[in-house]
Image: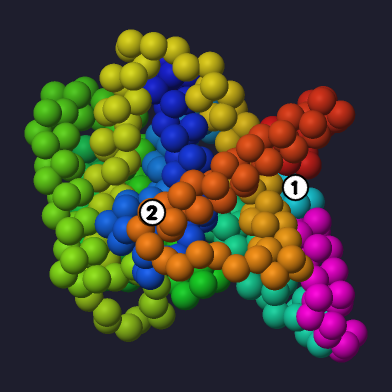
C-alpha cells in the first residue's frame, strides 16, 4: 500500500491553486463569468477529501490519538495562531491610521474579530479541521463498519449536507464539520475501498462529469446563485448545488491527477503542494496588502466587463500566489525546519 502517492501531491497543489483563485475573483456577480466563479469557489473541499484519504492511508493502522493531535497542534494550530497575530496587528494598523477609529472602537473591533474564531477570512478552515481531528474516534468507528454501512452513512451525510449548507460566515465550526463530513468520508472510502472504487471507476467518473455539469448549470443559470451556500443550520433554503459540484470535482480532480502522474513529473506543482499550507496561511495577508494599497492610492478598478474582470482576477491571483511563495521561501531559508511552526512548512 503506497503512502506517498504523486497523484495526491498533485491534487494538493491544485487544491491550493483553486483556493487562491477563489479568493482572487474581482467584480463578482457584475462582470466575472458566473459559471467560472462557481467552479472556482469552494476549493477547500479538495483539502478535506485529501485529509480523509490520508487519515485512513497513513494514520489508521497504528493510530495514536495523543500523538496524532500533538502533531496537528504543532503543524496546523501553531502556524494558524502565529499568522493570526500578524494579521490582527495589520488590521489594527488599518483601523487606527486609515479608518482613524478611537481606541475603544479598535478594542471592540478586535473583540468582534477574535470572537469569530479566526482573524483572516480563509482561516476559518483551521478551527473546523482541528474539530475534525478531535472527532477522529468517530472516523475510526466508521472505518470499522461494514462496507455497506460505510457507503450508506456516506450517502446519508451527503443528503444532510445538501440541505444544511455552510454556516453563516463559516463561524460555526461544528456546523462546518457536519457539512464537510462527506468530503472527509469519501476520502476515507477512496483509500479503504480502493478495489471497489477502481472496479466501478468508469461509472463513477461518468456520473461525476454529468452531475458536475448539471449542478454548475443549475446553480449558475437557473438558480443564479453566486458561490457557496450559507445559512443558519435549521432553516430550509433549497438544495446546495455547490456541494454536489465540489463532490464531483474531488473525483474528477483525482482522476486527472492520476492521469497526469503517470505521464509526467511537474517539479513546480510538487513544490506548490509541499508549501500548500504556507500559501494558505500567508495569501490572505497579500489580499489585505492589495486592498490597503488600492485604498491608499485611491486606485479605481475599471468597469466590470468579462475581459477586465478575468484579467484583473488573474493579476490578483498572481500577486497573492507569487507573494506567498516568495515569503514562504524566505521564512523557510531564515528559520529552516523551525518555519513549520510559524507557517506550516
Q: Of the residues under marks 1 and 2, which one precedes in the sequence?
A: 1
Task: Please tell me in which quadrant of the rendered image residue 305 appears.
Answer: bottom left
**Where are the magenta residues, as a range?**
84-104
Q: Which of 27 and 75 is in front in this view?
A: 27
Of badges 1 and 2, the one in the foreground is 2
**Which residue is pictured at 17% across the width and 50% down the height?**
213
**Image location (x, y in percent) of residue 180:** 39, 56
Camera-side residue of 122 and 81:
122
Q: Which residue does the image show at 23% across and 39% down from the upper left?
A: 146
Please give the residue where the numbered disc 1 appears in the rendered image: 78
Would you name the residue on which mark 2 appears?
A: 307
Compared with 234, 29 (above or below) is: above
> Looking at the image, is 273 positioned above or below residue 169?
above
Quadrant where the image shows the C terminus: top right
| Residue 59 rendering spot, x and y as whole percentages | 51, 31
Find the residue positioned furthest to the front: 302
Residue in the foreground of this view, choosing between 319 and 241 = 319
Of 337 and 256, which appears nearest the observer?
256
Q: Which residue is drawn at 90% across and 85% down?
A: 103
Q: Position of residue 256 (x, y in %)?
A: 29, 27
Amino acid at each position: 500500500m503506497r503512502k506517498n502517492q504523486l497523484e495526491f501531491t498533485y491534487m494538493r497543489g491544485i487544491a491550493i491553486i483553486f483556493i487562491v483563485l477563489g479568493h482572487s475573483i474581482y467584480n463578482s456577480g457584475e462582470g466575472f463569468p458566473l459559471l467560472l466563479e462557481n467552479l472556482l469557489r469552494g476549493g477547500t473541499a479538495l483539502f478535506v477529501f485529501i485529509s480523509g484519504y490520508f487519515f485512513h492511508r497513513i494514520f489508521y493502522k497504528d493510530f495514536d490519538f495523543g500523538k496524532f493531535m500533538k502533531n496537528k497542534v504543532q503543524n496546523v494550530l501553531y502556524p494558524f495562531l502565529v499568522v493570526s497575530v500578524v494579521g490582527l496587528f495589520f488590521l489594527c494598523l488599518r483601523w487606527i491610521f486609515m479608518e482613524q477609529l478611537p481606541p475603544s472602537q479598535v478594542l471592540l473591533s478586535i473583540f468582534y474579530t477574535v470572537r469569530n474564531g479566526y482573524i483572516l477570512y480563509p482561516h476559518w478552515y483551521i478551527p473546523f479541521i482541528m474539530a475534525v481531528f478531535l472527532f477522529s474516534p468517530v472516523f475510526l468507528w466508521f472505518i470499522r463498519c461494514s462496507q455497506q454501512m460505510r457507503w450508506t452513512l456516506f450517502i446519508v451525510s451527503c443528503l444532510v449536507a445538501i440541505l444544511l449548507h455552510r454556516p453563516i460566515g463559516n463561524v460555526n465550526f461544528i456546523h462546518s464539520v457536519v457539512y464537510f463530513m462527506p468530503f472527509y468520508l469519501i476520502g476515507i472510502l477512496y483509500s479503504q475501498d480502493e478495489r471497489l472504487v477502481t472496479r466501478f471507476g468508469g461509472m463513477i467518473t461518468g456520473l461525476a462529469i454529468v452531475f458536475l455539469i448539471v449542478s454548475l448549470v443549475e446553480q449558475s443559470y437557473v438558480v443564479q446563485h453566486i458561490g457557496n451556500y450559507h445559512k443558519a443550520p435549521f432553516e430550509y433554503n433549497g438544495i446546495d448545488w455547490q456541494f454536489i459540484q465540489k463532490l464531483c470535482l474531488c473525483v474528477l480532480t483525482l482522476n486527472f491527477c492520476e492521469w497526469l502522474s503517470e505521464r509526467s513529473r511537474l517539479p513546480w506543482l510538487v513544490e506548490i503542494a509541499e508549501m500548500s499550507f504556507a500559501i494558505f496561511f500567508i495569501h490572505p495577508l497579500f489580499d489585505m496588502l492589495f486592498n490597503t494599497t488600492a485604498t491608499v492610492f485611491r486606485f479605481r478598478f475599471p468597469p466590470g466587463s468579462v475581459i477586465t474582470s478575468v484579467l484583473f482576477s488573474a493579476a490578483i491571483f498572481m500577486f497573492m500566489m507569487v507573494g506567498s511563495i516568495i515569503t514562504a521561501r524566505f521564512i523557510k531559508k531564515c528559520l529552516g525546519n523551525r518555519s513549520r511552526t510559524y507557517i506550516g512548512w
